[in-house]
Image (cartoon, rainbow, N blue to C red):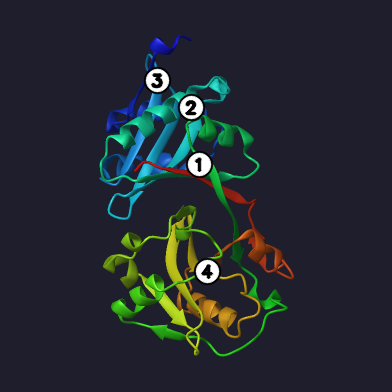
């Protein structure tokens, strides 16, 4: 198939039938359920690579932090047209368009460490590998062991105080800011908007040396999404009591999603209480 016969472009609402015909091998693909919302959203774009009217590959991006950070995702290819460079061709179009947006200064993409084909595609598109994260969901707290028990941490309610704690963070073992589940971004003040802070619960240890930020997030299921920027989860008295208190206060959540650095993951004495995903790696580059 000659390159000049291929058409990469943004999708419109009229492209839904083409997406429905695409053989991705994914059962119950959530993109089909929210396609209209993605097309209508000013902070998201979907792109497709077409041959005639057949959709061969899909990609998109979401904007965060006053449109400064673009996270590429929703990568899909028709099973009959993989390993032909089509996904790379489409990503190059996406990135070219991002260059044209003056507000965007960073582009990232998150994939499994062991997804070598996706990693090659990202590397060919100009992105470089960055931090590795482990996504664990605490679902069986009764099996927790090896942690230091203590009093629940103090909740901070005032937005300026929440922002102060986030801005004064002097070290970050994660090397990123887990803005949402599956969406790690650079740790940047532009992400700490009033709306985001209102939706966040921030708890501070009594001596002020540690804090944890927790949001309710939905990625098919509802989670208490825990953002903790040190590797000493099991050594800090009251950490797990605080996290579990948030879950108890939000019973619709199926568990506590916690982002761990590689060292934090190695520090876990027993994985039995968790649902464990394969590790993820963040690819990124700065446009400006």
Local SS, label 4: loop
Q: Residues within 10 Å of mark 3 (few under 14, many from 20)?
A: some
Q: Which residue is the site of mark 3?
A: 50
Q: Which residue is the site of mark 2?
A: 88
Marks 1 and 2: in contact by CB < 8 Å? no
Q: Residues within 10 Å of mark 4 (few under 14, many from 20)?
A: many
Q: Which residue is the site of mark 1?
A: 28
Q: Residues within 10 Å of mark 2 (few under 14, many from 20)?
A: many
Q: Which mark is residue 119?
A: none
| Foreground: disc 3 or disc 1 | 3
Distance between the Cα atoms at labels 4 and 3? 43 Å
Left or right: where 9 falls relative to 21: left
Q: Nearer the viewer, residue 28 or 274?
A: 274
Local SS, label 2: helix
Q: Nearer the viewer, residue 143 or 65?
A: 65
115 in relation to 274, above or below: above
Local SS, label 1: loop
Residue at position x 25%, y 45% in the image: 42
Left or right: where 234 falls relative to 121: right
Task: State which quadrant residue 95 falls in.
Answer: top left
Distance between the Cα atoms at labels 4 and 2? 34 Å
57 in relation to 139, above or below: above
| Quadrant of the drawing holding the C terminus | top left
Task: State which quadrant residue 215 falls in.
Answer: bottom left
Q: Which residue is the site of mark 4?
A: 229
| Sequence order check, earlier mark of 3 and 1 | 1
Distance between the Cα atoms at labels 2 and 1? 25 Å
Q: Residue 221 location in percent, x, y?
A: 49, 58
């Amino acid at each position: 198939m000659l390159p000049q016969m291929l058409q990469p472009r943004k999708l419109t609402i009229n492209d839904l039938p083409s997406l429905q015909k695409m053989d991705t091998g994914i059962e119950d693909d959530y993109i089909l359920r929210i396609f209209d919302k993605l097309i209508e959203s000013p902070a998201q774009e979907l792109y497709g690579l077409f041959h005639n009217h057949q959709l061969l590959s899909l990609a998109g991006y979401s904007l965060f932090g006053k449109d400064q950070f673009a996270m590429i995702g929703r990568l899909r290819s028709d099973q009959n047209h993989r390993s032909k460079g089509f996904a790379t061709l489409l990503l190059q179009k996406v990135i070219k368009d991002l260059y044209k947006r003056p507000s965007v200064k960073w582009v990232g993409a998150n994939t499994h460490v062991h997804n070598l084909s996706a990693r090659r595609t990202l590397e060919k598109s100009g992105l470089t590998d960055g931090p590795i994260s482990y996504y664990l969901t605490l679902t069986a707290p009764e099996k927790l062991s090896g942690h230091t028990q203590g009093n629940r941490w103090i909740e901070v309610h005032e937005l300026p105080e929440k922002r102060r704690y986030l801005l004064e963070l002097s070290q970050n073992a994660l090397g990123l800011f887990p803005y949402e589940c599956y969406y790690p971004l650079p740790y940047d003040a532009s992400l700490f908007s009033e709306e985001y802070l209102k939706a966040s619960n921030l708890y501070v240890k009594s001596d002020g040396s540690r804090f944890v930020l927790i949001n309710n997030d939905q990625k098919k299921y509802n989670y208490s999404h825990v953002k903790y920027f040190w590797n000493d989860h099991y050594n800090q008295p009251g950490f797990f009591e605080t996290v579990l208190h948030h879950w108890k206060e939000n019973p619709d959540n199926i568990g506590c999603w916690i982002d761990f650095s590689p060292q934090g993951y190695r520090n876990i004495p027993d994985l039995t209480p968790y649902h464990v995903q394969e590790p993820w790696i963040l690819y990124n580059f700065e446009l400006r």
